[in-house]
Amino acid sequence: MRVVVIGSGIVGASAAYYLTDRGASVTVVDGGYQGEATQAGAGIVCPWVDHPEDDDWYRLTREGARCYPGLVEALGEDFGYAKVGALLVSEDPAELEPVHSLLRRRRAEAPEMGEVTEVAAPAELFPPLSDTLSALLVPGAARVDGRSVRDALLQAAVARGARLHAGTATLTPDGQVLVHGATGGGLGVPGTRGVAAGPREHGAGGAGEEGRSGRDGSWRQAVPLGEADGAGAAGAAGAAGAASAGSVAASGADGGGAPRGRVAGGGAGGADGMGGAGGGLPVEGDAVIVAAGAWTGEVCRALGAELPVFPRRGQILHATLEGVDTAWWPIVLPSVGPYLLGFPGSRVVIGATVEDVGFAPRVTMGGLEEVLQAGLRVAPGLAGATVAETRVGLRPVYAPGKPLIGELTSRVVVATGLSAYGLTAGPFAGRIAAALALGERPPIDVTAYALPRP
């Protein structure tokens, strides 16, 4: 069976991996959009602290986290995955009790989280932390390098015969794939037989894995502060409306958001817009998986579908502490504000902002100020660290709330809307999408993530 996968982030790469494992002939098409969420995501894998009132969301993230040990074994290489544990921190110990209670309830069905313990001096585990903090340690939490795991999945898919194309994919009304501005090469994934890639904006990458819906009692923050029940829904709807074809094209001037091979200013349905069907190179396939992140709604518009998927921007900062071994520091998760986590190479990641600003993958002065101020309140010991890099990513959010994973038409499957949980749930979402594209029964009931039919 021939399957075309549109998008090479964590979901698309996972789908390609699982499809080729099942013997499918796979072509992956990626537009190289600036601000793609996977490219440099911080990659916090700690699903048990969020979505206490939403079993569907929790099931998806929990099963996604369970994919990683098997992938490490199957791929046989290091892609930055490590169980380093997570510190849930607060200046008020009483604030930790609800999440501690949640973890106690969930542990019977998720023993992989490990035994959660109280930590009186969290700075002993993450030295830059304020000595005023109390913490819970969740030992099963892990971090993963988003770019590395994506590349490893695509390398494995290519080794089994998958083809990679760089270019902007559009759909015809009957679900055929056209590729515009194709470079004739691949996506520049290391180890994929030397295929070439078009340029990517330096610093465009993942916005990390921070969460907190602000409305469902999750521990981590995933919507802009102040978006309470009604305001959050209204804000999401407004942002989804701003994600129209004209808005995406216009964002090229504001944030450099136009994809490779696309003429900025092309409108919906035009020959050069994402919704257009003119002039592209046909890519044959019996089924199509659209895993284009925040751009998924644009790709699917030609099918008559209006999917309110919008981008939520996150700005993150990488700093280095010369001579300090940060590789095994635990993840730090305050209830509101930035996460912190260490990586090899004396690197610490701080982020991320949570902004509904449309397709504007830009690092801003205000965003950096927010990250720095909030980060230093939690970890004042980082004041002397060297700023090494700033990154920005656009998380795909489905306005009604849940992820979108399901059949849009008889030949098109959509998988997107993972918001701040892309690197947690992405491998499992890709596996579900692969099963649907092959006409197989998915590993879980996907009714809760079903799409509106055009």
Image: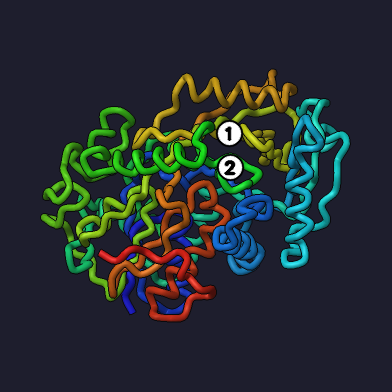
Q: Is the residue 45 above or below the residue 325 in the image?
A: below
Residue 190 visible in the snapshot: no
Residue at 86%, 44% in the rendered image:
118
Between the residue at mark 2 and the residue at mark 1, the CA separation in whole angstroms equals 8 Å
Residue at 41%, 44% in the rendered image:
36
Amino acid type of the residue tagged 1 in the rendering: Gly
Between 77 and 206, the one nearer to me in the picture: 206
Residue at which label 2 appears? 210
Q: Residues within 10 Å of mark 2 (few under 14, many from 20)?
A: many
Between 224 and 379, the one nearer to me in the picture: 224
Q: Position of residue 47 (x, y in %)?
A: 64, 54
- Mark 2 vs mark 1: which is more N-terminal? 2
Q: Position of residue 178 (x, y in %)?
A: 20, 60
Q: Is residue 194 left or right of residue 111?
A: left
Image quarter where the N terminus lies is: bottom left
Say what secondary structure mark 2 lies in: loop
Q: Is the residue 347 above or below the residue 240 in the image?
A: above
Residue at 63%, 25% in the rendered image:
374
Say what secondary structure mark 1 lies in: strand
